[in-house]
């Protein structure tokens, strides 16, 4: 069926009918129970392949007493032990540079990428030629689903270096027959240059992080350009929450006059677009025939029912160089199984991925995600576009403070307007989060902007002390 094989062998000259909303109609719209049966069979093939080619999986599954042929149902698959990022790091430390989960000869590696490694040893991705083509085909298919078409210009506004995001978007655009524009990001002055190039090229698609799309819009305005003049049709985002957060998504859609599509899971799981919205469906569909995703209890690693929250566990069904089989993400999300407006029969993450469970903090027993704070602030008229979250992580004070910028318009209206915005933000944050948040309003452009993923949580105990002294608390 529609080139669904393992190992994959895509035809690089395949295109669907021009009028079809689907790249592979059967794979995308089939009865989900039937798809699950086919996925079980595919899992057995992928596991047998990984076992034959990698000491890592041999060790892991021998210890657990599990064999590929034992997997007869998706429930059986839940017995397979998960793979963690730490195990991959350890494997690469002992078997440099690609780890003993590399399932192809090193001579087949076509591209090397990696994690940024800001904490500890970075992880190297060795991607074979075959996988590179598979990724391009998978991404082209999903980008078709977003409404992008051959001949469209796709502007990649993310750093072209270790990061898999930019490369994944680029090779998807190339395979889709687009005019691929690897503009990049990250160099001084590059955002102002992006404004000029966007005006010249008028791309149909723009890829970046949501934070950077907001930054780009600010710079455009500083340069006297309305971002709507770029004529973008689709902004597709990965890397951080935002694309499925209504206040942020709607704001960006309004600023650019374009559709926002949320996608992206983890670099290890490239083709990372396997969780992605479509032209007609918001949130993220789980394109299960490419990467099988379970939303699972973070402790037992068993699937939770649809409608509930859990951590995504991912299994490659089409990768042959470093296949991930039950890699646990450590993120949190919730999934549903409903009729999707686009007609695809995949499960969906209606609010996208909330963020990493590690980034969640507890304030008086309530779980708070940084993305929930961004959601509230972005929905407030007069918010200046950046903020910092200050928490007493593990401390005795159990306090949450938010420093938020007001915009130029509020600045022009003076201290009363600033105070009233601060009170409104406090009230709204407390209502939504269920805990008190202290808000300190700060001048426009106080905080640096990012051309990548936003980092907004800071541990600033001094601020607490000064707040407590002022308020006698
Ligand atoms: N993360 C990534 N995409 C996200 C999204 N759409 N919504 C919420 N959180 C998201 C190369 C792709 O951009 C994927 C990617 O960013 O991979 P990384 O660099 O390995 O980072 C993975 C983490 O980014 C995930 O675990 C999510 O926390 C976040």
Image (cartoon, helix red, strand yellow):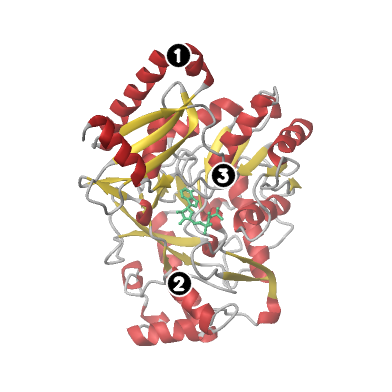
Give the vertical position of 293 relative to 263 (above or below): below
- Counting from the top left corner in percent of width and height, residue 328 is at 40, 65
**Relative depth, front residue between 465 and 259:** 465
Q: Disc 3 or disc 1, which is closer to the eye?
A: 1
**Figure quadrant of the N terminus:** bottom right
- Counting from the top left corner in percent of width and height, residue 105 is at 65, 82
Mark 3–mark 1 distance (CA, rounded to whole Å): 33 Å
| Residue identified by numbered label 3 | 209
Around disc 2, counting alpha carbons within 10 Å, would you say few (fewer than 14), some (14 to 19), or many (20 or more)? many
Relative placement, left or right, of 414 versus 394 is right
| Residue identified by numbered label 1 | 414
Q: Is mark 2 within 8 Å of ligand 1?
A: no
Relative placement, left or right, of 297 versus 195 is left
**Total label count?**
3
Give the vertical position of 444 relative to 73 (above or below): above
Relative placement, left or right, of 454 versus 293 is right
- Counting from the top left corner in percent of width and height, residue 420 is at 35, 18
- Counting from the top left corner in percent of width and height, residue 285 is at 46, 48
Choose the circle earlier in sequence order: 1 or 2: 2
Callout 1–callout 2 Cβ contact below 8 Å = no
Q: Disc 1 or disc 2, which is closer to the eye?
A: 1
Q: Disc 3 or disc 2, which is closer to the eye?
A: 3
- Residue 49 shows in this picture: no
Relative placement, left or right, of 286 versus 131 is left
Extreme-right residue of the structure = 200
Mark 3–mark 2 distance (CA, rounded to whole Å): 32 Å
**Element at badge 1?**
loop
């Amino acid at each position: 069926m529609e080139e669904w094989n393992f190992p994959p062998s895509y035809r690089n000259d395949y295109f669907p009918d021009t009028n079809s909303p689907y790249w592979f109609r059967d794979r995308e719209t089939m009865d989900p129970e039937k798809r699950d049966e086919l996925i079980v069979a595919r899992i057995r093939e992928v596991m047998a392949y990984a076992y034959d080619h990698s000491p890592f999986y041999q060790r892991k599954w021998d210890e657990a007493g599990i064999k590929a042929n034992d997997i007869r149902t998706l429930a059986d698959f839940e017995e397979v032990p998960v793979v963690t990022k730490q195990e991959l790091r350890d494997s690469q430390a002992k078997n440099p540079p690609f780890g003993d989960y590399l399932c192809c000869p090193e001579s087949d590696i076509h591209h090397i990428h990696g994690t940024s490694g800001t904490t500890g040893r970075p992880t190297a991705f060795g991607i074979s030629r075959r996988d590179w083509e598979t990724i391009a085909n998978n991404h082209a298919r999903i980008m078709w689903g977003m409404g992008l078409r051959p001949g469209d210009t796709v502007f990649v506004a993310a750093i072209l270096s270790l990061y898999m995001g930019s490369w994944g978007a680029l090779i998807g655009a190339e395979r889709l027959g687009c005019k691929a524009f690897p503009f990049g990001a990250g160099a001084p002055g590059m955002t102002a240059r992006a404004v000029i190039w966007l005006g010249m090229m008028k791309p149909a698609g723009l890829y970046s992080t949501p934070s950077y799309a907001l930054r780009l819009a600010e710079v455009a305005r500083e340069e006297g350009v309305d971002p709507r003049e770029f004529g973008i049709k689709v902004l597709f985002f990965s890397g951080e929450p935002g694309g499925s957060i209504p206040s942020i998504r709607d704001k960006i859609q309004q600023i650019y006059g374009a559709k926002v599509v949320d996608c992206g899971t983890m670099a290890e799981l490239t083709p990372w677009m396997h969780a992605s919205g479509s032209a007609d469906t918001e949130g993220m569909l789980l394109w299960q025939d490419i990467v099988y995703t379970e939303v699972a209890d973070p402790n037992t690693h068993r699937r939770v029912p649809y409608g509930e929250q859990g951590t995504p566990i991912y299994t490659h069904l089409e990768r042959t160089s470093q296949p991930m089989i039950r890699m646990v993400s450590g993120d949190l999300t919730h999934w549903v199984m409903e009729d999707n407006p686009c007609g695809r029969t995949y499960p969906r993450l209606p609010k996208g991925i909330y963020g990493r469970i590690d980034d969640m903090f507890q304030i008086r027993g309530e779980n708070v995600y940084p993305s929930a704070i961004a959601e509230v602030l972005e929905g407030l008229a007069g918010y200046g576009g950046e903020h910092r979250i200050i928490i007493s992580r593990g401390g005795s004070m159990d306090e949450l403070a938010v420093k938020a910028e007001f915009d130029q318009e509020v600045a022009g209206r003076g201290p009363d307007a600033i105070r009233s915005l601060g009170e409104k933000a406090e009230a709204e944050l407390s209502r939504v989060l269920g805990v008190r948040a202290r808000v300190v309003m700060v001048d426009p452009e106080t905080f640096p902007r990012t051309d990548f993923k936003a980092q907004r949580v800071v541990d600033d105990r001094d601020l607490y002390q000064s707040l407590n002294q002022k308020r006698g608390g």
